[in-house]
Amino acid sequence: MVRKPTSSTVEAAANAYIQARRGRAAIRPAPSAGIAAEKVLRPLARQFGVGVEQLREHWPEIVGSRLAQWSAPESLQRSGGIHTLIIRARGPAGAIIQAESRRILERVGTFSGRQAPTRIRVIQGHAQAPAGKAANAPSRKMTGQQSSSQVSETVETSAEARLLSALDRMSRSIKARDGH
């Protein structure tokens, strides 16, 4: 009677056979381009801070959705240790941005880190809409009642007027939802 070898000895013998007769190692794939780019760009980002494209992407979170409709960051200028953020704003929004400049600089500083701008320069002109939002925005015509109510919503300053406006908007949305 011939005794069968245990499975562990068979596996060990098979493993030794494979190791002794193994061919060349497989060629490793090329490293990821993203990893290589990150190794180069990370030190540059630390040295020079974020770019204007990143600010454009996150502009509504930085200044708020209302001001983001009327303004956009245009460029960053660096000279002599002074970092200036240039913002293009439409019409009177430039004055509002200038008034809110301290808050905007704080929020940009939080976003961009050590190399944050220390000044804001506002240029009046046509501000470009944030990327992706202008193409997706539906074009709809407003009636006279809608446009006057939207204008009145932006003008109200007292707490009572804002409350009445909010209640009016809520009633219009409920009526629109119910089909009245």
Image (cartoon, grey):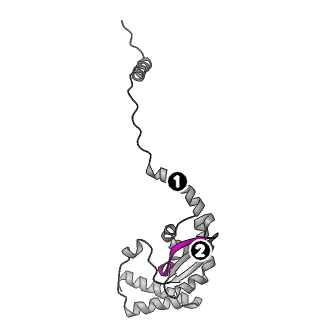
Magenta-tinted stretch: 66-80
Does residue 168 lie above or below 34 as drawn? below
Q: Position of residue 5 (x, y in %)?
A: 41, 14
Q: Residues within 10 Å of mark 1 (few under 14, many from 20)?
A: few
Amino acid on which the number 1 mark rests in the picture: Val
Does residue 123 lie above or below 51 as drawn? below
> Which residue is tagged 2?
84
Find residue 173 and report its image quarter.
Answer: bottom left
As drawn, the label of residue 40 is: 1
Q: Which element is circle 2 on?
A: strand
Reading the chain from its start, which is encountered first: label 2 or label 1?
Answer: 1
Find residue 147 and report its image quarter.
Answer: bottom left
Q: How many marks?
A: 2
Find residue 101 and report its image quarter.
Answer: bottom right
Does residue 147 lie above or below 66 as drawn? below
Q: Position of residue 111 (x, y in %)?
A: 58, 67
- For the point 56% across and 58% down, the residue is 44
Could you tell me what secondary structure mostly forms the magenta stretch?
Answer: strand
Q: Which element is circle 1 on?
A: helix
Per the image, is 117 magenta?
Answer: no
Left or right: where does residue 145 sit relative to residue 107? left
Amino acid on which the number 2 mark rests in the picture: Thr
Pick the front one: 29 or 62: 29
Q: Residues within 10 Å of mark 2 (few under 14, many from 20)?
A: some
- Asked if marks 2 and 1 touch (Cβ < 8 Å), the reply is no
